[in-house]
Image (tube, grey):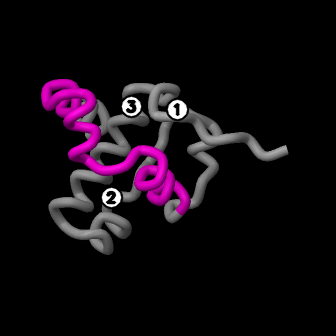
């Protein structure tokens, strides 16, 4: 049976940061550049770690949404903290 992917709330801080890095690079540098140079790199969740780069990036977009949504939800200070954890 396939495992379901976790929600944002179920991610560790590092994995949240990895999503934020990808979304930031996608916004700043464009989709192709971000996909090639900054794919989401999950470290902690086994299900997410097993995803292909394409699937991990797609997860970030479909499940998490946009960087502006994250910034509005978490606030800039928390968004930056998570970003720094992943860098």
The residue at 14%/26% (across/down) is 77
Name the secondary structure under disc 3.
helix
Distance between mark 2 and mark 1 Cα atoms:
17 Å
Vertical side of 26 occupied by 73: above or below: above
What's the magenta region? 55-81
Distance between mark 3 and mark 1 Cα atoms:
8 Å
Circle nearer the N terminus (2, 1): 2
Name the secondary structure under disc 2.
loop
**Mark 2 crowd level (few <14, some 14–19, many ≥20, 10 Å Cα):** many
User: Quadrant location of residue 87?
Assistant: top left
Residue 38 disc label:
2
**Mark 3 crowd level (few <14, some 14–19, many ≥20, 10 Å Cα):** many
Circle nearer the N terminus (3, 1): 3
What x and y, as percent, mark residue 3?
A: 73, 41
Quadrant containing the N terminus in the rendered view: top right
What count of labels does the image hold? 3
Task: Please name the predominant secondary structure of the magenta segment in the image.
Answer: helix
Q: Are marks 3 and 1 in contact (CB under 8 Å)?
A: yes
The residue at 36%/69% (across/down) is 36
In screen coordinates, is 42 left or right of 69?
A: right
Circle nearer the N terminus (2, 3): 3
**Mark 1 crowd level (few <14, some 14–19, many ≥20, 10 Å Cα):** few
The residue at 57%/45% (across/down) is 49
In the image, farthest residue toward the right: 1
What x and y, as percent, mark residue 19?
A: 37, 45
What x and y, as percent, mark residue 68?
A: 21, 46
Q: Nearer the viewer, residue 38 or 2?
A: 2
Residue, disc 1: 44
Distance between mark 2 and mark 3 Cα atoms:
15 Å
Residue 73 within the segment the image draws in magenta: yes
């Amino acid at each position: 049976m396939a495992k379901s992917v976790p929600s944002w709330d179920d991610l560790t801080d590092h994995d949240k940061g990895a999503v934020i890095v990808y979304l930031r690079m996608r916004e700043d540098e464009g989709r192709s550049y971000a996909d090639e140079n900054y794919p989401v790199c999950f470290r902690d969740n086994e299900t997410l770690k097993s995803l292909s780069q394409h699937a991990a990036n797609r997860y970030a977009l479909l499940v998490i949404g946009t960087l502006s949504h994250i910034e509005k939800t978490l606030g800039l200070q928390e968004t930056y903290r998570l970003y720094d954890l992943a860098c």
